Image (cartoon, helix red, strand yellow):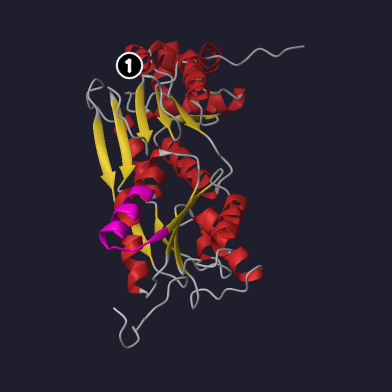
Amino acid sequence: MTRKAVSAKDVAELAGVSRAAVSRCFTPGASLSPKTRERILQAADQLGYQVNRLASGLIRNETGIVALIAAELSTPYRSSLLSALTEKLQQAGKLALTINTDRSDDSVEQALRHAISYRTDAAIFLSGMPARSLAETCLRNGMRLVLINRDEERPGSLRLRLNDAEAGRRAVALLLAAGCRRLGLASSAADTPSLTERERGFREAAMTAGVEFIEERRGPTSYETGQDLAMALLARPDRPDGIFCTTDLMACGIIDVARWRFGIRIPEELSLIGFDDIAQAGWEGYTLTTFSQPIEKIAAESVNWLISGEQKNQAKEVLLEPKLVMRRTVRQGFQPVAGEG
C-alpha cells in the first residue's frame, strides 16, 4: 500500500499551530517565536516531514533547478568542473540537473528543451551552443544562461572564457626559451572554441618568431588521441623537439608513447606543454608543465551571477587568465651552443 506523504497540515495539527506558522518555520528569515519554532521542528522530526522545495518554488515561479549541459563528462577536466559547479550550486541552495550531450547542435538544443520542460531557473553550458531562437525562448521563460568557453554571446547570458590564444603564444615563447628549434602543435579535431583559440595563438606566435612548426589534429580530446598524435609527430625524420598539446589528457598519451615506444627522454630530447592542469598532470609519471584552468573561479563566477540581481536581458563577459604551472617536461636552464641564436 502506498504511504501518503506527510504534509505541512499534519505537522501543524501535531504541533498545535497554524499552517502558516509551519510555512514561516521553514522559510529563511521569516518571523517566528523560538518556542513555536521548537514545537514545529519537534513535530516535523516525529512525523518525518520534508519541505517540498519544488512545490514552494513553483508558487514563487522558481524551482531552484539549474541545468548543467555538458559532453565528455568522464574527462578529468570536465568532471572537475562539474564537481566544482555542483558544490557551489548546492551551497547556494540550488539543485543541479546534469544533462549529458554530444557536441552536436541538435543534441544541445534537445538538452535545453528538456531543461525548459523541467522549469529550470538557469542553464550552464559546458559544451555546444543553443540557437539564438532557443536562447530567446529561455529568456522569455525567465531562464538565465551561463556560457563557459563558448565563442558567441547570447542575450541575458554570462559568458566566461579563458584567454586561450595567449596561452598558445606563451607556449611558443617557453619552448623557444628552452632551446627547442622544431616545434609541434598537437590538437584534437573537436574544433571547440577553446581548442581553436589555443591553436591560433600558437600559430601566430610561431610565425611571428619565424619558426617552422609541424601540426597534427586528430580525433576527440582523449588519451588515445594523444597516442595517435605522438605516432604521427614522432615517427617523422624531422620530429619536433618541443610540442604544445592543447589538452593535458592528450599530452599524457604523447608522453607515454614518446618514452615507451620511441625511447625519447623527456625533457632532454623532447619538451612538452599541456593545458588544463588535470590531476594526472601532477602525477610522478608525468609531472607535466601546463596551463591551469581556474575551475574554482569559473564555478564561483557562474553561481554568483545566477543568484545576483543583475538584469536578465543584458549579456556579460568575464575573461579569465590561465596560469602557467611549471613542472618537469620542459628543459630548464638551456644555454645555446656557440654560434646558435
Q: Residue at image x 60%, y 53%?
A: 228
- Residue 170 among those drawn in magenta: no
Helix, strand or loop: magenta stretch: helix
Residue furthest out toward the right: 1
Asked where in the image residue 263 lies, by quadrant, the reply is bottom right
Q: In this view, does 227 lie to the left or right of 62?
A: right
Three-letter residue code for mark 1: Leu
Q: Report crowding for label 1: few under 14, some 14 to 19, many 20 or more residues within 10 A (C-alpha).
A: some
> Which residues are drawn in magenta?
199-213
Identify which residue, 259 or 41, lies in the foreground. Answer: 259
Which element is circle 1 on?
A: helix
Residue under circle 1?
139
Residue 3 vs residue 213, the one in the foreground: 213
Where is residue 185? Give x, y as percent.
44, 56
Residue shown at 42%/67% (left/top)? 182
In the image, is residue 296 above or below residue 14? below
